[in-house]
Amino acid sequence: MRTYTKVQKRGSVGRSIDITRYIGYDELRHDLARMFGIEGQLEDPQSSDWKLVYVDHENDILLVGDDPWEEFVSCTQSIKILSSAEVQQLSLDGDLGNLPVPNQACSRTESGSAWRGHCDDNSASYNR
């Protein structure tokens, strides 16, 4: 089953990708970096100026890579490539907190969801 996901980066044309064709996060990061002209800048999320976040089916915003691959594929609605400054601003605005607790991406519980934000059509940070 194909799972097409919209990928956006400010200042770039959005793309639609089939995330089921990837075997894991490393391959996804490499391909997205190539697509958006930021080769070598997504491979190490700890030191990069770019961060990958995704919006799940509950409109929660989470970091890409913190959940098992299969769970990520099954619940991803869209992916955003954000600068570190954009992620920091979301955190300051209360849309994001600290780091997520793994395996919480698609759960309905609020425990352990410190990095969750909410993405809606009125959010200035996410133009749809």
Image: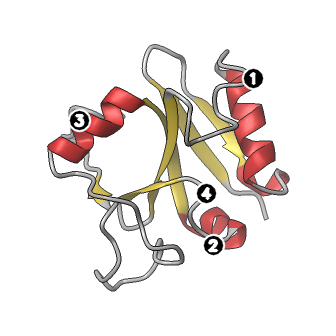
The reply to whether callout 1 and callout 4 are in contact (CB within 8 Å) is no
At a point 27% along the width and 53% down the height, the residue shown is 96
Q: Looking at the rendering, in which quadrant would you find the N terminus?
A: bottom right
Q: Secondary structure at mark 2?
A: helix
Whichever of callouts 3 and 4 sits on the residue coming sooner in the sequence is 4
Q: x%, y% of residue 125?
A: 27, 33
Q: x%, y% of residue 98?
A: 31, 58
**Cα–Cα gap, marks 4 and 2:** 10 Å
Q: Nearer the viewer, residue 57 or 1?
A: 57
Q: Which residue is mark 1?
A: 34
**Cα–Cα gap, marks 3 and 1:** 26 Å
Q: Nearer the viewer, residue 85 or 1?
A: 85
Q: Looking at the rendering, in which quadrant would you find the C terminus?
A: top left
Q: Which residue is mark 4?
A: 65
Please name which of the two marks, 1 or 4, marks the residue nearer to the observer. Answer: 4
In the image, is residue 113 above or below residue 77?
below
Kind of residue indicated by mark 4: Gly
The reply to whether callout 4 and callout 2 are in contact (CB within 8 Å) is no
